[in-house]
Image: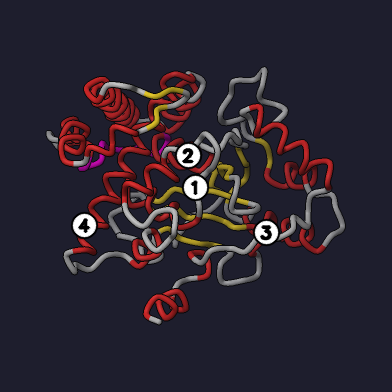
Amino acid sequence: MAMVYLLLQLPCCLLPRPHEEDMYRDAEEIEREKVLLVCGTGSSDFPENKLSVEPEVGIMDYCQKEWRGTTSQAKCIRKGYEAVSQKFISIRRVRGDNYCAVRATLFQALSQAVQLPDWLKREDMMLLPEKLMEKYGWIAQWQLRQKWTSKAENLVDEIKDCLMLLKSKWKRMSEMKAFAERQAACDELFRSEEDEYKLYEAVKFLMLNTAIHLYEDNEKGKEVPVFAWLLFARDTSSNPSQLMENHLNQLGHTGGLEQVEMFLLAYALQHTIQVYRLYKYNTDEFITLYPNDPEEAWPIVTLITEDDRHYNIPARVCEETSL
């Protein structure tokens, strides 16, 4: 009964979504997407084009090209884009390979960086893989992109290398004074497939570290964010080990981030993620914040989604974006 009561108190975006028919894409497009996902990409534009974040296009130009249908859902999405266009001029399409939520969030965070975050300045940050591995042997089953590391010491070194890369790139971006310079540097970084995917490994490991802290705090009776209760209430992630095995190890391979994991991403990077959820236009959930009650000191990154599965990036603020 306690869990039922808890679920009733959660924001709708945290509740598991039942299977629902895709009302705004035709059957041919849905089948094409399934084939592309099996091939390891989410867009027919990307097999020969290594751009992870495409150049800007006008938001309404993009909307009119992609959403010409007459269904109620298509009309709702167009209305959503019209509302977003009051804040942003352009949109940047993000590669859809199950990393898109992490990719879009990290791209925005780096392109807006004005200083190295305090959590990346900590001297013990680079010791994190070794400390966690010593305490939790199951982390040896961490799955790196497209391969398994058989020896724990190699895994420690590889994850440490990913964290060092994240720190060095974030530091470099924050030292650039001009936004255009940071943007160009981010464009270049997200064309380098090897570095790009190392950054995602670092972010995934930070998410695991955050989840471990939340789980242990909750076990000790300490107050934790509401989303943490649901994170570990799932049959597939009743503890951090299952979360790693069934979710974080699959991220970028067979699945993207679920809604509750967007909160975990926000906490791991200590950024508020503001998302325009276009299919929720004209509801209280049209603009959703992760977390719901953001820390004032956390920077804000803004994303766009049409379906809570794929995320793109709005660009060029045409007026001050505020919470």
Inter-mark Cα distance, 4 to 2: 23 Å
Hey, which residue is sitting farthest left in the picture? 123
Residue 70 vs residue 252, the one in the foreground = 252
> What residue type is disc 4 on?
Glu
Inter-mark Cα distance, 3 to 1: 22 Å
Q: Can residue 35 be seen here?
A: yes
> What residue type is disc 2 on?
Leu
Residue beneath disc 1: 257
Tell me which segment is drawn in magenta.
Answer: 111-119
Secondary element at tag 4:
helix
Residue beneath disc 2: 251
Residue beneath disc 4: 216
Colouring mode (rainbow / by chain / secondary structure / one colour): secondary structure
Residue 214: give x, y in percent of width and height.
Answer: 26, 57
Picture quarter containing residue 286? bottom right
Quadrant of the image containing the C terminus: bottom left
User: Mark 2 or 1 closer to N-term?
Assistant: 2
Which SS type dominates the magenta stretch?
loop
Residue 118 falls inside the magenta stretch: yes
User: Mark 4 or 1 closer to N-term?
Assistant: 4
Residue 312 falls inside the magenta stretch: no
